[in-house]
Image: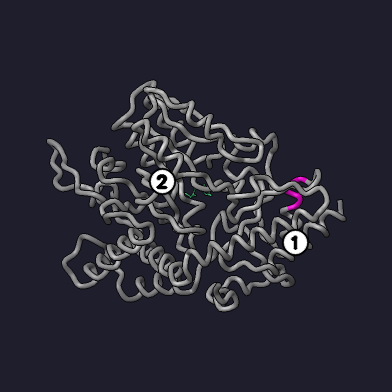
């Protein structure tokens, strides 16, 4: 599919030795991914050779920096197949993108008693942002239930719609269960009721092709750092017809046309939602990361990671008392597990002693933990550079730890 050894050489950190003893086995990619050299080089190069504030200067460097920043927007547009760059808003990440919609959509289109539908498997960012909007405006959250194996209850979903439903805000892929949700169906049903949708793409964009026009979502959010890009930058895609009617999120430079003490007029899209100096170095890094992913081929990445995930699940299920949460089909490159009554924190800490980085805890999904009747899990999550050797190290590590208990 692709040359994994060559790919691994693009990520300098992968050759790190942990505790002076163990080669790094990095399986915490759902939290953040490692960066290829080309991303860091592009950002360093911009700092050393181009750096100037964007959109503000007539001078050479400012124009060059602006061109780079705007060409990054075009790269993002192409990557998710949006229709226009005016529909691509740069944010600090998925969290900010969702908060922007929860705030501005609620202000523009919702009043006390109106409802937003979220699901039981949401990340806190897609729950708390709506709860904050609810405190301010009196809107109400309705929750799509899930089955015991972590699949959305679509009949339950359909039954939530009523004349007060204003928006559906749902994750594309669960960061805990790996469930790939049927977003096309979710969006189609919402649209049948005349209701727009926000899809949380934090865990989808790094793993498979996303086409916002084909999907027909109204908003789509994702983070740069989860797709081999830098921290501190993310994207909100929004259909122009919604964004046009929404008030700005923050006030400041760049988002205005004119300002006086008698009133202010706001800039065109997307700048209306981009107050202040953007992280234009990070947008360059993000564009480079998306180009890197495209050069390998997102479909190749999907096939590779699917094979790896299936291999991991089959090997892990050989371990006595192993429980893997989430469905067996439509399962993305995230495996949450629990072994007997070994506490997830003990498991994670001891795996770390073997150089294996996994995540432990509630994974910012406490309502989901409550639904599953657990406190937390251990989570191994894969990226395009992980190998079957990584999986074998994890499985051997878990076996070793089991024997200790
Ligand atoms: N949504 C999901 C499904 C996530 O997995 C995460 C991060 O783990 C987020 C939202 C928040 O992303 P960020 O912290 O990059 O804003």
**344 magenta-colored:** yes
**Which mark is first along the chain, 2 or 1?**
2
Between 17 and 1, the residue placed more toward the observer is: 1
Between 32 and 2, the residue placed more toward the observer is: 2
Callout 2: SS: helix
- Is residue 134 toward the left or the right of residue 68 in the image? right
Residue named by callout 2? 96
Quadrant showing the N terminus: bottom right
- Taking 161 as reference, is 187 above or below it? below
Q: Does any atom of ligand 1 lie closer than 8 Å to the CB of label 1? A: no
Residue sitting at x 29%, y 47%: 273
Q: Which residues are magenta?
A: 343-347
Which label belongs to residue 353? 1
- Taking 83 as reference, is 218 above or below it? above
- Is residue 110 toward the left or the right of residue 202 in the image? left
Q: Is there a contact, CB below 8 Å, between mark 1 and mark 2?
A: no
**277 magenta-colored:** no
> Dot 2, crowdedness within 10 Å: few (<14), some or many (≥20)?
many
Residue sitting at x 40%, y 63%: 286
Q: Quadrant of residue 279?
A: bottom left
């Amino acid at each position: 599919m692709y040359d994994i050894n060559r790919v691994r050489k693009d990520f300098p950190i992968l050759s790190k030795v942990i505790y002076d003893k163990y080669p790094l086995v990095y399986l915490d990619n759902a939290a953040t991914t490692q960066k290829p050299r080309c991303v860091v080089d592009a950002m360093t190069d911009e700092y050393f050779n181009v750096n100037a504030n964007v959109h503000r200067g007539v001078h050479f460097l400012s124009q060059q920096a602006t061109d780079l920043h705007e060409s990054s927007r075009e790269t993002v547009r192409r990557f998710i197949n949006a229709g226009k760059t005016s529909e691509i808003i740069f944010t600090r990440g998925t969290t900010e993108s969702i908060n922007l919609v929860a705030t501005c959509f609620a202000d523009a289109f919702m009043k006390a008693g109106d409802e937003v539908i979220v699901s039981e498997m949401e990340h806190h960012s897609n729950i708390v942002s709506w709860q904050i909007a609810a405190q301010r405006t009196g809107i109400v959250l309705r929750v799509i239930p899930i089955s015991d194996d972590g699949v959305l209850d679509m009949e339950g979903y359909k039954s939530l719609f009523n004349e007060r439903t204003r928006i559906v805000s749902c994750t594309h892929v669960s960061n805990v269960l790996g469930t790939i949700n049927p977003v096309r169906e979710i969006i189609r049903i919402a649209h049948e009721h005349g209701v727009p949708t926000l899809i949380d793409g934090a865990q989808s964009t790094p793993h498979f092709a996303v086409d916002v026009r084909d999907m027909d979502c109204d908003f789509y959010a994702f983070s740069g750092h989860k797709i081999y890009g830098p921290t501190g930058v993310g994207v909100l895609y929004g259909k122009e017809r919604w964004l046009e009617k929404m008030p700005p999120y923050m006030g400041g430079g760049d988002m205005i046309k004119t300002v006086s003490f008698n009133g202010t007029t706001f800039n065109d899209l997307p700048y209306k939602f981009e107050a202040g100096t953007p992280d234009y170095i990070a947008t360059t890094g993000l564009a480079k990361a998306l180009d890197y992913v495209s050069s390998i081929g997102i479909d190749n990445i999907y096939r590779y990671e699917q094979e790896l995930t299936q291999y991991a699940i089959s090997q892990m299920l050989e371990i006595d008392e192993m429980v893997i949460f989430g469905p067996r089909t439509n399962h993305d490159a995230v495996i949450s597990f629990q072994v007997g009554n070994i506490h997830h924190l003990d498991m994670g800490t001891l795996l770390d002693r073997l150089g294996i980085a996994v995540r432990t805890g509630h994974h910012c999904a406490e309502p989901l933990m409550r639904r599953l009747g657990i406190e937390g899990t251990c989570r191994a999550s894969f990226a395009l550079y992980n190998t079957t050797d990584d999986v074998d190290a994890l499985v051997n590590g878990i076996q070793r730890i089991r024997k200790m208990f």
